[in-house]
Image: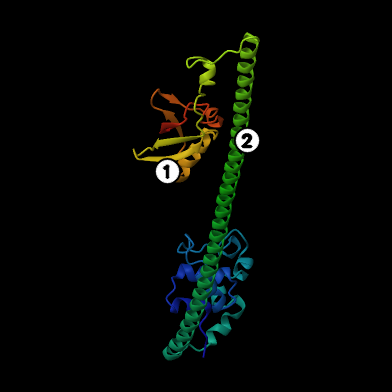
């Protein structure tokens, strides 16, 4: 019984001749398994169905001498496993019966199904590994984003703590200054009344300044109630320390407002209209005249 050649086997299995010839040529006619592996790996090549063009040395009728041309095998001879020296032996081989041919094709088709199943399993494993890598990278990215957010919140909390401490120190200095001013006024008024007429004490009258004491000082506000009108027309209200910078209000809007992420904005006072700059963001609310209360408007830059 004569076995089918690799090229014949591929043709019997239903492969196009162009594909079969390329598979046999590119695998060096090493067998049906190698040819099938090559076909499955290159089935998506754009030129897979183009006619196979053998190298110049394998083309009969070239510019070489007739002896070398006769000895050089063509693709069909290679696929059939024959050369010019064994033409006589090939003619003596018996042809396969139809039943034997069908049996061999059946075995080859089963081999091809096994190869395809192995390839699908390999592709499934590779896809699963890629999905694992994608999820791992996503988790790492999420952890990085979370850490950045935590760092930002920590920095903001530390900044608020520093601002509170500075505000506390500022209030302490103000209290000390008020106490010194009162002491100086008491000493001043007390000295002038004693030196005016040492022989005759001056009785304070109901209308005299000494009976009324020092003039009341202007009330000091240490907090400011800020109302902010957002881009969509809604408002939010919060209370800030008078010594907090305007940047604290902008951070509050970023955290608690509905401003789109990444949207750059600034603040302005409607009456009188004044747009606050980056330099103003570092100034205390009291210095900007936003104490004890104010209305600000969010506007796009």
Sooner in the amino-acid sequence: mark 2 or mark 1: 2
Mark 2 falls on what kind of element? helix
| Observer able to see residue 27 | yes
Q: Measuring 56% from the left and 31% from the top, which residue is drawn there?
A: 282
Question: Residue 274, percent across and down?
Answer: 44, 24
Judge whether 187 appears above or below 166 on screen.
above
Question: Residue 15, percent across and down?
Answer: 44, 73
Pointer 1: what residue? Answer: 257
Q: Nearer the viewer, residue 254 or 148?
A: 254
Question: Residue 275, percent across and down?
Answer: 45, 26
Q: Nearer the viewer, residue 162 or 170?
A: 170
Pointer 2: what residue? Answer: 169
User: Does the CB distance between marks 2 and 1 fall below 8 Å?
Assistant: no
Horizontal side of residue 65 vs 100, given as left or right: right
Question: Residue 193, percent across and down?
Answer: 61, 13
Placement of the C terminus among the 4 image quadrants: top left
| Observer able to see residue 262 | no
Q: Nearer the viewer, residue 24 or 255?
A: 255
Judge whether 269 appears above or below 116 on screen.
above
Mark 1 falls on what kind of element? loop
Q: Measuring 62% from the left and 12% from the top, which residue is drawn there?
A: 192
Q: Nearer the viewer, residue 118 or 94?
A: 118
Using the rendered view, name the quadrant where residue 33 is placed.
Answer: bottom right
Marks 2 and 1, how far apart at CA? 31 Å
């Amino acid at each position: 019984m004569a076995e089918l050649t690799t090229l014949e086997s591929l043709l019997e299995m239903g492969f196009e001749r162009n594909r079969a010839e390329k598979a046999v040529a590119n695998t060096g006619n090493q067998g049906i398994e190698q040819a099938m592996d090559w076909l499955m790996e290159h089935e998506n090549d754009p030129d897979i169905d183009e006619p196979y063009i053998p190298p110049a040395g394998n083309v009969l009728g070239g510019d070489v001498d007739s002896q070398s041309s006769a000895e050089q095998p063509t693709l069909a001879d290679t696929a059939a496993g024959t050369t010019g020296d064994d033409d006589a032996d090939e003619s003596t081989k018996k042809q396969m019966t139809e039943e034997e041919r069908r049996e061999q094709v059946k075995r080859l088709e089963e081999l091809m199904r096994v190869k395809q199943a192995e390839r699908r399993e390999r592709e499934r494993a590779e896809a699963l590994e890629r999905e694992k890598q994608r999820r791992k990278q996503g988790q790492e990215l999420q952890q990085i984003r979370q850490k950045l957010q935590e760092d930002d919140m920590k920095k903001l909390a530390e900044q608020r703590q520093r601002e509170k401490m500075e505000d506390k120190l500022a209030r302490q200095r103000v209290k000390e200054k008020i106490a010194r001013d009162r002491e100086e006024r008491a000493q001043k008024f007390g000295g002038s009344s004693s030196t005016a007429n040492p022989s005759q004490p001056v009785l304070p009258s109901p209308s005299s300044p000494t009976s009324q004491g020092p003039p009341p000082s202007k009330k000091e506000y240490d907090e400011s109630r800020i109302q902010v009108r957002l881009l969509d027309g809604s408002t939010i209200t919060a209370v800030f320390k008078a010594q907090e910078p305007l940047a604290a209000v902008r951070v509050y809007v970023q955290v608690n407002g509905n401003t789109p992420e990444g949207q750059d904005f600034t603040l302005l006072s409607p009456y009188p209209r004044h747009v606050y700059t980056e330099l103003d963001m570092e100034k205390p609310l009291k210095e900007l005249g936003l104490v004890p209360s104010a209305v600000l408007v969010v506007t796009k830059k």
